[in-house]
Image: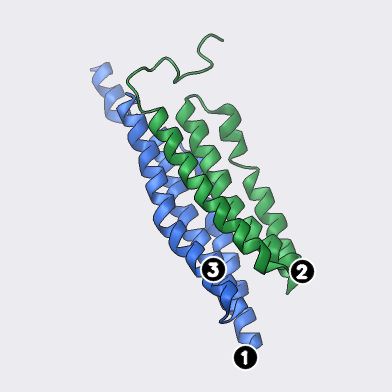
Amino acid sequence: MESFFLYSAVILTAIIAVPAYRVIKGPTVFDRLVGTNAIATKTIVLICLIGYVFDRIGMFVDITLAYAVLGFVGSLTIAKYFSSENTNFRYDDRDQ
Amino acid sequence: MTEISNILTIFFVVAGIFFLLIGSIGTIRLPDFYSRTHATSKSDTLGMLLIITGLIIFEGFNINSGKLFLILLFILLANPIGAHALARAAMNSGLLPSFKDNNKKEDG
């Protein structure tokens, strides 16, 4: 059963690499934030699976809970920061 | 009893990984910011809920499964709220969604 969790963690790591394309390539800053949110929420599940691989779920589940709370607070803070009328920041590769 | 719980765990984790894969593909394939938010928020939430449900079934009934259930409740509340806050920030910032009708009006 641990090998199943190990293979699931490897496949999930490959899935996490997919939204990194949107983080690098996204035309607006909100596309990049969507990519980082997708990566952060998949990392929560990945930490749980790594806890079962190492057979230390009692320690890793606390790390997962703290990571989820910090990611949610950071996401809300960044969304509030970018919700202004000034749109000069939106296309951050406009000059190219 | 353990075989039944293992089979249920494998089923839930595989289904959750399928939904996470669909959400990731939607993040890079869809044309607009709002449609990307639509894809990644809902399918990611469902996939994470399925995987953590599978881990709770594998764990049994003890303190760790209680903490996993708390993580499940928090994700169920926090992930759509974060996506909605980000979409509202984009709408307040003046980023318009792209429709086909906008191009038709410009042509006519």
Residue identifier under label 1 = B1
Amino acid carrying label 2: it is Ser
Tell me the quarter of the image containing the N terminus of chain A: bottom right
Q: CA distance from mark 2 to mark 1?
A: 20 Å
Q: Which residue is mark 2?
A: A3
Considering depth in this image, is A35 or B60 the residue closer to the camera? B60
The vertical placement of A51 against B81, above or below, is below
Residue A39 is situated, as x and y percent measured from the top left of the image, at 58, 44
Distance from the alpha carbon under mark 2 to that under mark 3: 23 Å
Residue found 53% across the figure and 9% down from its top: A95
**Secondary element at tag 1:** loop
Residue A83, compared with residue B11, is above or below; it is above
Residue B67, label in figure: 3
Residue A48: x, y in percent? 63, 62
Task: Let me know if marks 2 and 1 both belong to one chain.
Answer: no
Residue placed farthest to the bottom in the image? B1
Residue drawn where x is 42% and y is 40% of the image: A76
For residue A7, side relative to residue B18 (left or right):
right
